[in-house]
């Protein structure tokens, strides 16, 4: 079974600064998908960024980028120019390849990020 | 609708009662997922529906939990004889269902269940 570990339960950053959230995972699969989801106080999970394991290039979405290290099974999220609206719980998630119920997500425990003014 | 909706938003019940949680997916989405978010266990997969195929119930924690999806749209998660450990936020998500892992799962706001 796959496991996802987020070792930082809480983090804080000053507005406009950069912060990196850590995620490691364990799997025997060679191809898979990794995601970062954001959950603000409204509880609604929002996809931030995703990465396919067979793509070596790190994914980027505006101020969000990842550092994907396949050999180390590490998938960290970097948030640049942090904004107050980035305050939320961030979850790292894993998905197996293939069809059917492989599309279910396996989540880490989450990191609570607070952006301070 | 514009997004995934869930009802009720909050539910307080007494131990031993049955509860029903409802999810309305995004129109046209054939895949639907239920997850549970609790303090002790984090976010866990419960059940997955894809079109008219038999659902994947591998994540349901006990036979007190069941779910159905009528007409390929609305889904209801039922918890019978609720226990205090069932207290959690129950999240529903839907996706297109044909693009595989590359498609986005859109989540609803969840139902917060408290069993007294």
Image (tube, coloured by chain):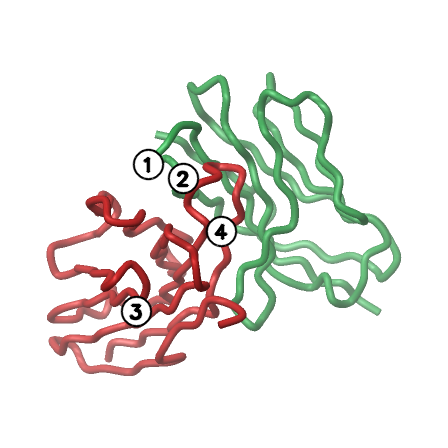
Chain colours: A green, B red
User: Gap between marks 3 and 4, in whole Å?
Assistant: 24 Å
> Which residue shows up at 46% across the image and 35% down it?
A95
Seen from the viewer's position, the closer of residues A109 and B44 is: B44
User: Gap between marks 1 and 4, in whole Å?
Assistant: 14 Å
Residue A8 is left or right of residue A59, and the answer is left
Seen from the viewer's position, the closer of residues B99 and A8 is: B99
- Confirm or deny contact between disc 1 and disc 2 (CB under 8 A): yes
Q: Quadrant of residue A60?
A: top right
Q: Is residue A19 visible?
A: no
- Which circle, 2 or 3, is nearer the viewer? 2
- The location of residue B109, given as percent across then percent down, is 48, 70
Q: Which mark is residue B87?
A: 3
Callout 4: residue from which chain? Answer: B
Q: Residues within 10 Å of mark 2 (few under 14, many from 20)?
A: many
- Which circle, 3 or 4, is nearer the viewer? 4
On the image, numbered disc 4 is attached to which residue? B105
Residue A17 sits above or below residue A3 on the image:
below
Q: Secondary structure at mark 1?
A: helix
Callout 3: residue from which chain? Answer: B
- The location of residue B91, given as percent across then percent down, is 40, 62
User: Gap between marks 2 and 4, in whole Å?
Assistant: 9 Å
């Amino acid at each position: 079974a796959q496991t996802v570990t987020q070792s930082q339960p809480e983090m804080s950053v000053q507005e406009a600064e950069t912060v990196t959230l850590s995620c490691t995972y364990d799997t025997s699969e060679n191809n898979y998908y990794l995601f970062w989801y954001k959950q603000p106080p409204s509880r609604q999970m929002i996809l931030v960024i995703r990465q396919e394991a067979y793509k070596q290039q790190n994914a980027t979405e505006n101020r969000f980028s990842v550092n994907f290290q396949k050999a180390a099974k590490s998938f960290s999220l970097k948030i640049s120019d942090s904004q107050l609206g980035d305050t939320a719980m961030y979850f790292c998630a894993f998905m197996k390849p293939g069809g059917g119920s492989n599309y279910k997500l396996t989540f880490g425990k989450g990191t609570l990020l607070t952006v301070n003014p | 609708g514009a997004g995934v909706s869930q009802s009720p938003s909050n539910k307080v019940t007494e131990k031993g009662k049955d509860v029903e949680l409802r999810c309305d997916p995004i129109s046209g989405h054939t895949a639907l997922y239920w997850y549970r978010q609790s303090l002790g266990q984090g976010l866990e997969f419960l059940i997955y529906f894809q079109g008219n195929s038999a659902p994947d119930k591998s994540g349901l924690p006990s036979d007190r939990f069941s779910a159905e999806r009528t007409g390929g749209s609305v889904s209801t998660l039922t918890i019978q004889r609720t226990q205090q450990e069932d207290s959690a936020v129950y999240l529903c998500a839907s996706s297109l269902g044909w693009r595989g892992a590359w498609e986005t799962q859109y989540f609803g706001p969840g139902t917060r269940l408290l069993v007294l």
